[in-house]
Amino acid sequence: MDKIFRVNMTDLTTKIEEVPAAWAGLGGRSLTSTIVSAEVPPTCHALSAENKLVFAPGLLTGTPAANSGRLSAGAKSPLTGGIKESNAGGTAAQMLAKLGIKALIIEGAPKGDAWYNLAVGVNGVTISEEKELLGLGNFAVIDAVEARLGKKTGVLTIGPAGELKMTAANISVKDPDSKIRSHGRGGLGAVMGSKQIKFISIDGEGAPGVKIADPEKFKVAARTFSKAILEHPVSGEGLPTYGTNVLVNILNEAGGLPTRNFTTGQFKDHDKISGETMYDTIVARGGKPKHGCHAGCIIQCSQVYHDKDGKYVTSGFEYETIWGLGADCCIDNLDDIARADNLMDDIGIDSIETAVMFGVAMEAGILNWGDSKEMLRLLTDEIGKGTALGRILGGGAGSVGRTYGVTRVPVVKNQAIPAYDPRSVKGIGVTYATSTMGADHTSGYTIATNILNVGGYVDPLKKDGQVELSRNLQIATAAVDSTGMCIFVAFPALDIPECLPALIDMINARFGIALTGDDVTNLGKYVLKTEREFNQKAGLSNVHDRLPDFFKNEPVAPHNAVWDFTDEELDEFWNF
Amino acid sequence: MQITLKLFATFRNGRFKVAEQELAEGTEVRAVVLSLGLTEEEIGIVMLNGRHGELDSKLAHGDTLSLFPLVGGG
């Protein structure tokens, strides 16, 4: 039977608890958000002992289901002041699931200055004082933990940004190549830092594995599900070839590629940073165009990017990072963007928040537009070393905007707006405004239907149908985020009729239950409402479900589109 | 009439990124697609001057036509 592992950092004790009946049907985001809502006082300071950091694998994680290896991390966010769930690939989720750990809850905070590491294994969690690895970057931590505990050890770690409690700090997860995937958004690395935990190691030795109630039924459903993923042109061919960065050219053509801190919708040098160029560069230099973030991923949207000498620079090189440092900062040098991606992984800072922050910093005059060398220096010498300027930059886009008096600051609930302009792709604007997470494209990815013709088509430049589209996608995403599935399974799920029933059949076969499609929708609704209730108690109300005013007042080229939703129209989102 | 034709992702293989094309007045997008040796089924996204178009959209002088296979990301 699955258990809850609980760690108290105030008195340095650990416990193994039975799973409460009410949590039995939950996993991933539905579980982290339920636990944070139940146990964290919404008005607490996110970096205080009262906050809790919760890790939970999804309902299907640890099974042979394709693409089910995502780990949810949850807490009150020091960036948004609301609830946060951020999910990532890597090896940790499957290891935790196979150890029978439904959730790992870390609460309290040490009274003294000592730092610790946690060792998670089949018999529970051990807390040890950590001295040697303090101040190190994430790559060095992973290497050192492997040297100490073995190559197979799972690792969750924070870099200097997390140790310094910067609100853009992330939590890094070791991937199958001992590189890094990230619980990127919302400053969860700062929460781990506030608990004075440098890293968590996971030992899979003796793990009982995940028991499947009806193996035959599971096998049939898993086969149907995999077939749907591989048959869909996006998940079966587009993503494996070009990665997510294929979107640079598409959004540029659609006039929705935010450029020069969201002042225009097209970037003249788009082709230099595009997915097509990146693919050719990777192949020419002997990198890997295809790569999975976790075992069992059959989409393989990730890649390994090499420099001119054929040496590793970065992996998991995503559209949002490339767009942000590229178009939004007017940088046309993909090699420098790749170096920055690697530095951000090492320092342990969210590459979306930080990329958008640099756009605001350029507007503030901290560095010049397009100056990639100074951007790399600021990452290394200021953020990485935690200077006073580095801490302002490491606080994200909102922090720099407030400090330097910039009014064009693309954030919602203080979290940076990613790679799709909400004026010219209006559905995603509804998601940015209303998401419980702050501006987050993944929480209701209307780009699928607004731009990519997946799941039908809703005109991105018109208001009609956008609130409903965003609502349906946010509900479905909250449910998918509870299964441990990669969000890209949504592409086949939106277009191939057998896909979603196969996903539900796998959950039913795993637990010996009989969920229907309605049950899954209701789970998604429950997650959103639980998160919203926490946010409201934390002081985030409907007036925070808004985009910054400049989107209303500044038309964006080439369509001269403005953000024209009324407050009442946005509030309709929650009418379910 | 003259249009600008842009190709993306796998459509560029063995073809081009961007080209000016001389077409008869009122040519439909479909005819351009077929002239490239592509089938209707291979077309994921048609964009005409930065807005979504259809295979039977009629082209006009000075238009920019962009063709994408079905791809995506996030």
Image (cartoon, coloured by chain):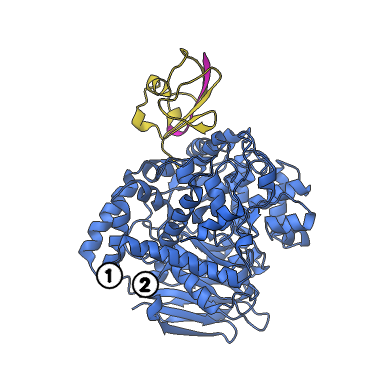
Chain colours: A blue, B yellow
Residue at (48% x, 42% y) in the render: A450
Within 10 Å of disc 2 (Cα), the crowding (few <14, some 14-19, many 20+) is some
Q: Horizontal and vertical percent for residue B73?
A: 47, 45
In the displayed structure, A102 sits above or below A495; it is below
Q: Which residue is mark 1?
A: A513
A194 vs A299, left or right, is right
**Subunit ID for the residue under disc 1:** A
Q: Horizontal and vertical percent for residue A234?
A: 40, 43
In the displayed structure, A437 sits above or below A291; it is below
Residue at (56% x, 85% y) in the render: A12
**Subunit ID for the residue under disc 2:** A
How many numbered marks, from 0 up?
Answer: 2
Say whether residue A52 is visible: yes
Chief SS of the magenta region: strand
- Tell me whether circle 2 and circle 1 mark residues in contact (CB < 8 Å): yes
Q: Which residue is mark 2?
A: A25
Residue at (75% x, 51% y) in the render: A407
Q: Quadrant of residue A368?
A: top right
Specify whether residue A213 is painted magenta.
no
Within 10 Å of disc 1 (Cα), the crowding (few <14, some 14-19, many 20+) is few
* Front-most of residues A239 and A381: A239
Q: Quadrant of residue A307?
A: top right
Q: The residue under label 1 is which amino acid type?
A: Ile
Q: Bounds of the magenta span?
A: B1-10
Measured in 3D between alpha carbons, the distance from the residue under mark 2 to the one under mark 1, in whole angstroms, is 10 Å
Q: Horizontal and vertical percent for residue A413?
A: 63, 60
Disc on the earlier residue, 2 or 1: 2
